[in-house]
Amino acid sequence: MTESCLFCRLYRDGDHVAATEGFVAIRDINPQAPVHLLVLPERHIDSFREIGELPPDETKRMLEFVADVAAREGLTDYRVAVNVGPSAGQTVFHLHWHIKGGWS
Ligand code: AMP
Ligand code: ZN
């Protein structure tokens, strides 16, 4: 937890759509799809580049949680994305998974 990190603060104090031990889902403040959620781990890692810092069981549970959150939102078809680095569009440097869906 770093006080300077927006997603560490939102993990602790944010409005969570879903939660499981070590992970939460929030709604993106600036949705790019009819449903746009973000899944973030409690453990602060700057980006997907450092995915090896997560214990393998946490990585597995995180990916299962991404799928669970999408299902709970009623999404059958959706896109999962991670932006890695500023040139690729990363603006918040705490690992997070975008879930976008809800198109008709
Ligand atoms: P990225 O650009 O891949 O780092 O994704 C960061 C995402 O966080 C963007 O889609 C933003 O719209 C979203 N975001 C920024 N601030 C907040 C916030 N306070 N609550 C929810 N989502 C946010
Ligand atoms: Zn953080």
Image (cartoon, rainbow, N blue to C red):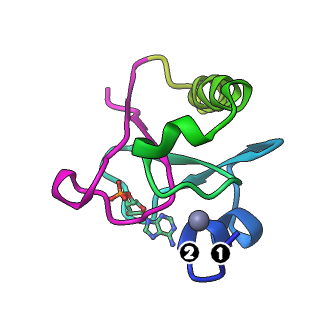
Amino acid at circle 2: Cys
In front of the other: 2 or 70: 2
Mark number displayed over residue 49: none
Q: Quadrant of ligand 1?
A: bottom left
Residue at the outermost right position: 21
- Whether residue 52 is visible here, answered yes or no, is yes
- Whether residue 35 is visible here, answered yes or no, is no
Q: Which residue is mark 2?
A: 5
Q: Is residue 86 magenta?
A: yes
Residue at the outermost bottom position: 4
Q: Secondary structure at mark 2?
A: loop
> Which residue sits at x=37%, y=63%?
30
In front of the other: 39 or 75: 39
> Which residue sits at x=38%, y=44%?
34
Q: Which residues are magenta?
A: 77-104
Q: Is residue 26 left or right of residue 34?
A: right
Determine the image quadrant of residue 18.
top right
Amino acid at circle 1: Thr
Mark number displayed over residue 2: 1
Q: Quadrant of the N terminus?
A: bottom right
Structural distance between the alpha carbons of marks 2 and 1:
5 Å
User: Dot 1, how many residues are within 10 Å of its Cα: few (below 14), some (14-19), or many (20+)?
Assistant: few
Label 2 CB sits under 8 Å from any ligand 2 atom: yes
The image position of residue 95, as x and y in percent, is 50, 51
The image position of residue 101, as x and y in percent, is 39, 33
Residue at the outermost front position: 53
Label 1 CB sits under 8 Å from any ligand 2 atom: yes
The image position of residue 11, as x and y in percent, is 69, 62
Q: Are marks 2 and 1 in contact (CB under 8 Å)?
A: yes
Q: Secondary structure at mark 1?
A: loop
